[in-house]
Image: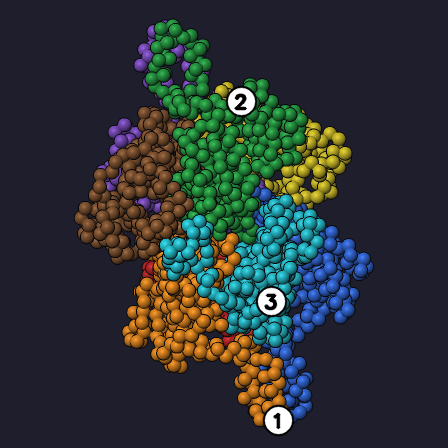
Chain colours: A blue, B red, C cyan, D orange, E yellow, F green, G purple, H brown
Amino acid sequence: MHVDKLKELLEEVRTGKKSVESALRDLEGLPFEKITDATVDHHRHLRQGFPEVILGEGKTEDQILAIVQSMVDKGEDVLITRLEDSKSGALRTAFPAMQYDPCSRTARLITRPIKKTGKGAIVIVTAGAADVPVAEEARVTAEVMGNKVETIFDVGSAGIHRLMKDTEKIRIASVLIVVAGMEGVLPSVVSALVDRPVIAVPTSTGYGVSFHGLAALLTMLNACAPGVLVVNINNGFGAAYMASLINQS
Amino acid sequence: MHVDKLKELLEEVRTGKKSVESALRDLEGLPFEKITDATVDHHRHLRQGFPEVILGEGKTEDQILAIVQSMVDKGEDVLITRLEDSKSGALRTAFPAMQYDPCSRTARLITRPIKKTGKGAIVIVTAGAADVPVAEEARVTAEVMGNKVETIFDVGSAGIHRLMKDTEKIRIASVLIVVAGMEGVLPSVVSALVDRPVIAVPTSTGYGVSFHGLAALLTMLNACAPGVLVVNINNGFGAAYMASLINQS
Amino acid sequence: MHVDKLKELLEEVRTGKKSVESALRDLEGLPFEKITDATVDHHRHLRQGFPEVILGEGKTEDQILAIVQSMVDKGEDVLITRLEDSKSGALRTAFPAMQYDPCSRTARLITRPIKKTGKGAIVIVTAGAADVPVAEEARVTAEVMGNKVETIFDVGSAGIHRLMKDTEKIRIASVLIVVAGMEGVLPSVVSALVDRPVIAVPTSTGYGVSFHGLAALLTMLNACAPGVLVVNINNGFGAAYMASLINQS
Amino acid sequence: MHVDKLKELLEEVRTGKKSVESALRDLEGLPFEKITDATVDHHRHLRQGFPEVILGEGKTEDQILAIVQSMVDKGEDVLITRLEDSKSGALRTAFPAMQYDPCSRTARLITRPIKKTGKGAIVIVTAGAADVPVAEEARVTAEVMGNKVETIFDVGSAGIHRLMKDTEKIRIASVLIVVAGMEGVLPSVVSALVDRPVIAVPTSTGYGVSFHGLAALLTMLNACAPGVLVVNINNGFGAAYMASLINQS
Amino acid sequence: MHVDKLKELLEEVRTGKKSVESALRDLEGLPFEKITDATVDHHRHLRQGFPEVILGEGKTEDQILAIVQSMVDKGEDVLITRLEDSKSGALRTAFPAMQYDPCSRTARLITRPIKKTGKGAIVIVTAGAADVPVAEEARVTAEVMGNKVETIFDVGSAGIHRLMKDTEKIRIASVLIVVAGMEGVLPSVVSALVDRPVIAVPTSTGYGVSFHGLAALLTMLNACAPGVLVVNINNGFGAAYMASLINQS
Amino acid sequence: MHVDKLKELLEEVRTGKKSVESALRDLEGLPFEKITDATVDHHRHLRQGFPEVILGEGKTEDQILAIVQSMVDKGEDVLITRLEDSKSGALRTAFPAMQYDPCSRTARLITRPIKKTGKGAIVIVTAGAADVPVAEEARVTAEVMGNKVETIFDVGSAGIHRLMKDTEKIRIASVLIVVAGMEGVLPSVVSALVDRPVIAVPTSTGYGVSFHGLAALLTMLNACAPGVLVVNINNGFGAAYMASLINQS
Amino acid sequence: MHVDKLKELLEEVRTGKKSVESALRDLEGLPFEKITDATVDHHRHLRQGFPEVILGEGKTEDQILAIVQSMVDKGEDVLITRLEDSKSGALRTAFPAMQYDPCSRTARLITRPIKKTGKGAIVIVTAGAADVPVAEEARVTAEVMGNKVETIFDVGSAGIHRLMKDTEKIRIASVLIVVAGMEGVLPSVVSALVDRPVIAVPTSTGYGVSFHGLAALLTMLNACAPGVLVVNINNGFGAAYMASLINQS
Amino acid sequence: MHVDKLKELLEEVRTGKKSVESALRDLEGLPFEKITDATVDHHRHLRQGFPEVILGEGKTEDQILAIVQSMVDKGEDVLITRLEDSKSGALRTAFPAMQYDPCSRTARLITRPIKKTGKGAIVIVTAGAADVPVAEEARVTAEVMGNKVETIFDVGSAGIHRLMKDTEKIRIASVLIVVAGMEGVLPSVVSALVDRPVIAVPTSTGYGVSFHGLAALLTMLNACAPGVLVVNINNGFGAAYMASLINQS
């Protein structure tokens, strides 16, 4: 809440237009409102339409059920990430409209139509077949947030030509998400080919000194090519959220 | 070089409009041209006007001198990062117009006027006074790339109110760079307050288990709040380059 | 055993008031008595009433049964921590009065009434739902040690307002236990809001570079805000024990 | 600012007792006031009397001079930690009353008398001679915060008897700070002897696999004995701050 | 594609010997052709005859089936590595000619005869019985690539005499692959005995501070004896591929 | 084989007392014979009587069966360590005299009587109940090697008095094995009490930053008290082997 | 020494053709002779002509002087690596013919002409200017060992075209050494372009999470492309030694 | 103090043979006396004759001077380890009889003759010239403790024959100290050759992934060969102390 708004509110209290109780309620959450909320109009759809996101990992099925029920009661759409198949049964029974996707381990309960917005497409590229689940988490998230998404999977570090054959897709990209495990070279390579922000997602694909994604993460953070930013290992959701922020700004 | 262009070039060879030698020269660098080069017109200024960037660290003074001379000969502007004061002497003698800034350890030799472009400002926030050199590297880079830059330094993790007093600056931000060492909490906190992409730069500020910036890096990568992307420790340049990509897209 | 007591004992031997055998028995454990035992009267209840604590992890069911039996035979109360559900069956059969709580993985066999003591309440705060089991271990421990406990769960790093709505609880806090995984920011944030000792408990909640709680631990150890002390990852018991020491001192 | 206070303020605005401008000023810093500020009376001296603490490390001499000058202008006392001798010259020239202690690397500029408060003494124990600088940082901090401090230095892990000869000092301890490097065993040993909270400070003393204090830190975090909490390596200041919170609560 | 070839192609376009469409197809994959392809004649067999290699790990059974089917359709031979037994069932049903070896976790579908080539034999040495699966992966790979392979298993670090009794085998070695876990000493020892390139393969055999092969890897990288090169932990395939390159060059 | 022996052998060849074939056989293993074999008479029993030791971990049941069979065929006694219960079935069926102990995970097939030798007893001390399996591996190994063994289990770091009550056992110790996980303090403490070599065995007991025994290992390596040597985590066998070397020297 | 040779020697002793003393001298070094020494004729030049290599690091100037003097006395050529400029003074004074190169930190004292041998050239590629010293160590070593060497420096990960312009050099490569720091991507990229063994040398170039070369090392070990082997960080010497083995085999 | 002695003391008090004051003095240090002190007669010389050992590292010159003075005043001999040359000046001035050795960084002030004791010699072996300082620290310590010491330096991992030529020295070894950096293989190799306890000392010799001795340490801890125990990196003193315990037991 900005100073102008606060001043206005106090004036309303002073002149009796607003009761103390009503002002109290307005002030209660004050420090936690986002500064830019009121000023960024084109974000409105995002803020209103975007479902709450529940991290399924670490929660019991009962906890998740309760959260979803409370959201549904308020008419909110729901996106659950990192939800193991084994935990999705009761949810699907309770909410038959919920779509569960075992590859991306996401569950969606979307009732309102999603309007596509943004400057261009979010293009998601993966190095290998084993990186696809993380990429799918990103795809689902980005689509639910109202972005056009294109995917170019299984490019490999030795198969850049597959990427180059898809120049039509890349031409409309406003931001790319590049998902890779093992040595994690692909984001560097893509960034050298494309003048767009590249969000690099290391995955836990690999063995030995891949250290469950740490080696890929280090490669990406050390990338000589500027224009590569990095998220946590396997964090397809976070990459898509950021890509959406960039695409829709 | 896209298929259409290639086809056109071959047609010109076929019809004799272009000699084989000339076509050879066009094809030589072919695989390394950026895919998006021809299609992203608003990037043109950036690509043309942006000085080459030299990483000063690890190079001898003689190596740097030679690179700068060759760039100056071609009429290019120059930006050097991570240049120790002790290595800047001969450069400044050879190129009196070069501006060296010991805080950010950058040297600039800019002869063309920089035109400000982009959707908004890049706002650079630091947690503490010790993080300022990294922030200054980001500021110099972002300005040289033609962005409006605002800085909010020394916010601390306990002094968020300083940030909130600067809402005017934040209102015009299209992207924020948040620089922090030690526990590296600030990007998370800022991201919770602002609906803009946040680029987090861990710094080597701290002692003990800060592990020269590793702890801050981990904090930033683990941030619950989506909308935080991370670059290498102390990589102010990389953060600014990415911020510029986002601001100018 | 302090010098005065030792002198007294020797005097009794010298004067024949105490036999050599009796003195031998008194001296036997001498180096291991706590220095402060005799002088800290308000600790008496704690020392007498507090059940022995058995770390269930790493022990076989038979080992635990034997220890509990021997304690029950001496009339002692029992608290077992880190006891897997699968190991609790025989215990519950053998000691029907034993209360097993699968969430906190604790088992209690308390026969004496627990008297609440201490300057105020121990307030336990968690960042997320997945941190609750660790917090519950702390809660059970603190209550068994005779403290009033308040809990504020699922505050999140983005939901500080939930904490601020519970100011009544915090007002009576003499010490806070803050439990968080992932980036582990919450203890810093709480410490900036409250002038009370904060005991930070990192949890293994998270994925990727959370490194099973290591990232949260580093964040907490690097906290700029003084007034944050740290225990081992997932060590709810240790946090509660320390909190009790502080609350009851 | 608690709800009651906020309500009262709004009532004053409503009734005209307070102008909108004055209310605005009151509200400005609102989210950052400490929740417990108004309710913990015995903390008043601490909050009022305690000098601001400046972390000298990572700041330039000019930055420190400016901060100190601004604090002195406001009549505040000053404590600087981690201040290298080489950076202290200009400070001592500018503020002749400033006391610089090269062992603890602290500088103090205290003009108001420090009133001793607290339930007992803070007892600071070190394992070896090389741990003394960290212990001295703790001592200076604790004294400046108004605590009675006792020190038992150079106890070693093999020389517990030195500790036991100092039972008089320990008898009045309300909290102990135990400083140790290398294998970091001392806090465990002390905690087994004393029923008081023990704050363990690992130091970077040692070589080889001491890893600059990491081994000691791990030992302390893994301590079987509950009642040991840990701060960052070499963080004498943080330990003393926490000890003061406990001693004065 | 080298400049000469490119020039020739353009000449053919210019003179009408080649259509633009045909030239386009030739140029399409241009940047990705191997530089040395056309010039290294003795590699031809290798390039043509060597089956594609599929990394089974991280792929679903369906993904693998699809890849194999597409290769079989093109008449290619197939080698799959890191294929769990549990994933091999459907493959064996679909392709009855496929040979699955549970020890090396490889599956082969080779229809063309393999011609042995190379200067000598590839000799594979293991330290212990637990290292055999990795060595077998190397053996299968090397044989499929057309090399003569000799194995000397279970040499141990204390049983060099077994190696020395096999001097006949070693006499014909053109390159050795030495597979060892735990302290990983064997490659150093072998390299001191033999004037041939030694490819060291650390394995995850061991416990405690073997850190799943990391200790062996470090030993091998630190080997005083030059002539030892290292691949990733358990990477028998990579070692054999490299050995084949050396043997057949 | 020492120069004198070699000379003698050559003399015998020269004089015809020894055939070339017989000399060849003597020389064959030459570089691998232990230098001290011939000179350390009191070791003879050990060398002759000690069963071969098989590391069960990493070997298949079939591999182990084959090794045992070959040893039994030669009349050798057998000791297997790190043998999972699930792998012991076929062994016990094939060799009914084999004793399998699930706690220490050892299997023994000893047919010759073991003669106790050595200067004194090997005393094995454990910190906690969870360390017992490692201690038992040490006990079995030491007994099989012909040593008198005493055990003092579950001493804890807070219960040194149990150790002191067993002074009779310690009085006859020629070497101690101290087994501890978590913070691994016990070897330091024991070493400070006893003027005997202490072999420290870190165990993987613990959680969080115990890092599966790494923290205990570091503590032991950093021990201020000299007279503590360290083996790999959980390596009860290695500790006992070394203790036997010392006891029997 | 092989069995045949040994038999022959014993026969000579038996028949008196060889004295016992002479046989003793032959047998003395027996276990340490290289197995392949006698059988690999084309290695002779290498073994005879290659200077002994002294690792300068960690030795005092006096130690190095003594070793060099003893080698010169025996008429051997000398190569010293990792020799700091500050330690080279006395050497150059004592041996005026010694060539010291500060970039590669090598010193050579070669009196015999070096004959070039091998199947082709060793091509050394570096990613950046800061990697040149390591590459130069490799170049000096490879040349001294009698190999033709070509260098392609400063290729960068974004400037592969420089490599492709040098196809003439690559065409004659029998093995490549690729030197890179930071993210260490170059070896993967080169290996994808060239069907030759690639020896990857990580360098300590970089900052932050490059961890002094560790990140580059991990990238190289994780390389998806087979045909990449790795040496220790900055180990230009080891890479060249191995490359020479391959080139001359 | 054992129970018998304690009983006797109490009897003396009871019968008046000993005054309470005198008994108090006897009892004061009671818990810290070594259990085995009274019973291990052949240790007497060691305990009485062995100088106190001061760790010079981390202490100021003044601190060391004070400790030495106090020891000299009591007539004790002095051994200082890890004493930098730069700190030894004042010591040598104050105590002209003090012998400072810059290689081992030890200083000795021994006035009583050292009587050689022990079963045999302590043989100290080093891998390289750079390991000598650590070996010398061990030699000085072992000699001061009254052991016969033999050294075999610069054996290398490739030069075992130097060790085998010194069989006379090894024949009298009761224990060996093997000092090695880089890959740390030597202790394993020696242990395979010698049936004596081997104490392995990793050194910080090496570069890159030697990680300042960590790689060597891991190698030694993972040694397949039993009979190898390990001390901290560069801890020559600790190795010698333990070797002396073994040699003199």
How many residues crowd mark 2 within 10 Å: few (<14), some (14–19), many (20+)? few
Q: Distance between the Cα atoms at labels 2 and 1?
A: 102 Å
Q: Where is residue F199 in the image (x, y as percent from the top left)?
A: 44, 40
Front-most of residues F6 and H4 = H4
Secondary structure found at label 3: loop
- CB-based contact (under 8 Å), mark 2 and mark 1: no
Chain to which the residue tagged by mark 2 belongs? F
Q: Do tags 3 and 2 sit on the same chain?
A: no
- The residue that appears at 45% across and 67% down in the rendered structure is D174
Front-most of residues F114 and E79 = F114
Q: Nearer the viewer, mark 3 or mark 1?
A: 3
Q: Which amino acid does label 3 sit on?
A: Lys
According to the image, label 2 marks what residue? F112
Residue A197, by quadrant, is bottom right
Q: Nearer the viewer, mark 3 or mark 2?
A: 3
Image position of A231 (left or right of G26): right
- The residue that appears at 34% across and 70% down in the rendered structure is D107
Does residue H241 appear anywhere in the picture? Answer: yes
Q: Where is residue E106 in the image (x, y as percent from the top left)?
A: 65, 34
Picture disc at residue C115: 3
Picture disc at residue F27: none
- The residue that appears at 66% across and 32% down in the rendered structure is E102
